[in-house]
Each structure stands twice: as C-alpha cells, then as structure tokens.
Amino acid sequence: MFVGLVLFIGCAVFYAGYRKMWIPIVRLEALYREGLATPGTIIVVEPPRGDGKVGSVTYAFTQPGGESCEAKQKVSMQEFAAIRVGQSVTVLHLDGQAKPSVIYEYGGYRCE
C-alpha cells in the first residue's frame, strides 16, 4: 500500500514538472522551427514586481489573414532595459493561430 502511494505521488510530481518545464520548451522550439515570422509592435512594458527578475511585455501583431492579435511574454531584466513601447519586433506564430506566439528577439533562441 505504501509503495503504491509513493509511486502515485512520484508520478504526479513528474507529470506536473513535465507539463511546467518540458512542454513549454518543446512548444518554443517548434515556433522557431516551423513558425511564421510576422512584424509586431510592443504596446505595453511592465516592470518586474517587487524583487522580481523578470518583466513582461505585451505585443500586437496581425496574422496573414488580417486578424489582429495581442499576447504577453516574460523578459529578463537584461532584455527589459532596452525595450520601449512602439518598438518593432518579429513575432513567431503558427499559421492561423494567435497562440502560441513568441517575440523572436526575446525568445532565447536564434535561427541560423
């Protein structure tokens, strides 16, 4: 009985960690591999709260079909210092989908 409970808890913890850490990484890599590059604009810059080390930006872009979209992304303090409202950025997204999307310049990867 005890072993079963330990296995169940271990599996639950593994699954939660998998969803929290691995799936977003795979999704981000897919955007860099298969995503469409679309021009976008930074519309809101939010500084970190408290002693936080991560700020956030809200950006807008228009999909090829004409649909306007907005999304939010966390950015590091190093990146945050150089970001301004109205700044032009490149947004990667999947064809016909507003989410997931990422600002190419602040996503942590580079295409070569």
Image: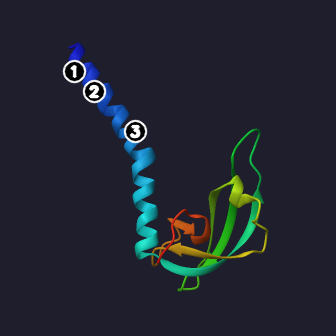
Q: Amino acid at mark 1?
A: Gly
- Name the residue tied to disc 2: 8
Q: Position of residue 42 (x, y in %)?
A: 72, 70
- Name the residue tied to disc 1: 4
- Residue 67 left/right relative to 96: right
- Name the residue tied to disc 3: 16
- Residue 101 left/right relative to 68: left
Q: Amino acid at mark 3?
A: Ala
Label located before the other in sequence (2 or 3)? 2
| Residues tagged 1 and 2 counted as in contact (Cβ below 8 A) | yes
How crowded is the residue under tag 3: few (<14 C-alpha within 10 Å), some, or many (20+)? few
Q: Which circle marks residue 33 in the picture?
A: none
User: Mark 3 falls on what kind of element?
Assistant: helix
The answer to which of 66 and 5 lies nearer the viewer is: 5
- Residue 82 left/right relative to 102: right
Quarter of the figure that contains the N terminus: top left
